[in-house]
Image (tube, rainbow, N blue to C red):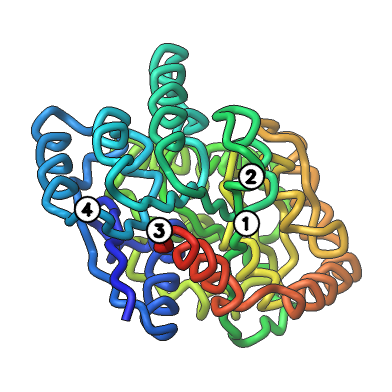
Amino acid sequence: MTRVHFLVPDGLDLPTGGYGYDRRIIAELREAGFLVEIVAVSRAFPCPGGADLADAARRLAALPDGALVLADGLAFGAMPEIAEREGARLNIVALCHHPLCLETGLSPEESARLEDSERRALAMARSVVVTAPATGREVATRFGVAPEKLSVALPGTDPAPLSPGGGRPPLILSIGTLIPRKGHDILIAALARLRALDWTCRIIGSGEADPATAADLRQRIAEAGLGERVTMTGRSEDTRAALAKADIFALASRYEGYGMVFAEAMSQGVPIVACAAGPIPDVVPASAGLLVPADDPQAFADALERLITDEALRARLAAGAAEAGRALPSWRDAAAVFVARLDEAARP
């Protein structure tokens, strides 16, 4: 049985797409016969303090020479000195959900620091796995990772009930952690332009990562006079059950490493309104939804209005979403990429 140490910030229980991806890959690797041991570093990553870095250094230093390590980029990309010190003796496969420097809201100085940090760290990995082809192109260009070191492991999608659609009024559902990159502010601004139409909206997402953003979104809803039409729920919500009741899925993300929630919406036949940002156009075909430029509330409102008012279009895109969902890969398919790279890294 091959032992692999999975380096990840503490928080595997959190309901984010990235952690959900990690949980499923861990489960599939164990099913494939790997002995997976979690090496949990501080939840402060990718913005660690000195004590956080010292703790991470101790944990990696405690691993034996030649140990096989699968390192989540949320932590690995923020520890370049540790990666450079340990990379020569450990067999590291890095997982990059999306470049840290592309997180929304960073100052130019912080973005440049994270870009340099992740470039140095990834240089020490035997190989790098990304979650989408567009992310792979970004990693190759921005960090200089050679094509032969890159692999793409698209997230898997579990089967779930199709939404029947036809809601009166139509229910607009948005799912995403309450952080600036997810663009909930754009969604709220778009909905404020559509007061005259008949609709309801639910936003499901944890505010624990960024309480200030969560509070700001609630204030925006109140100031727009949408308190009775837009509800916000926390992370305990069953998102697949919610999608089974939705008529439209809307998320105005400014960037995604892949966008697992879009795949889940398609697998349940829910038409999508989203932004043509990062890999999202690769995930959501034109037959499944409407994509608009990022950071454009009016364009987002126009797309929502089309789906709210045109039931035939909504039904056509729902059918297209379901068809695209049936073609999505499984989690076993995703894990097979990791198995191949880990087996390769384990060889002398």
Q: Say which quadrant the C terminus sits in.
A: bottom left
Residue on which disc 4 sits: 65
Tag 3: amino acid: Pro
Indicate the secondary structure of the residue bearing disc 2. Answer: helix
Vertical position of residue 283 compared to residue 237: above or below: above
Left or right: 268 in relation to 242? right
Residue at mark 3 to residue at mark 4: CA–CA distance: 12 Å
Q: CA distance from mark 2 to mark 3?
A: 26 Å
The numbered disc on residue 190 is none
The tag earlier along the polypeptide, 1 or 3, is 1
Mark 4 vs mark 1, CA separation in Å: 28 Å
Instruction: Please determine whether, in this image, residue 296 is positioned above or below residue 42.
Output: above
Within 10 Å of the Cα at label 4, are there few (<14), some (14-19), or many (20+) other Cα atoms? Answer: few
Is 249 or 70 nearer to us in this picture?
70
Identify the residue position indicated by label 3 in the image. Answer: 348
Residue underneath mark 1? 152
Task: Say which amino acid is labelled 4.
Answer: Asp
Between 131 and 140, the one nearer to me in the picture: 140
Q: 249 or 44, which is in the foreground?
A: 44
Q: Which mark is residue 136?
A: 2
Q: Give the amino acid type for the residue marked by disc 2 in the picture.
A: Gly
* Mark 4 in CB contact with mark 1 (< 8 angstroms): no
Residue 47 point in image, percent of width and height: 27, 32
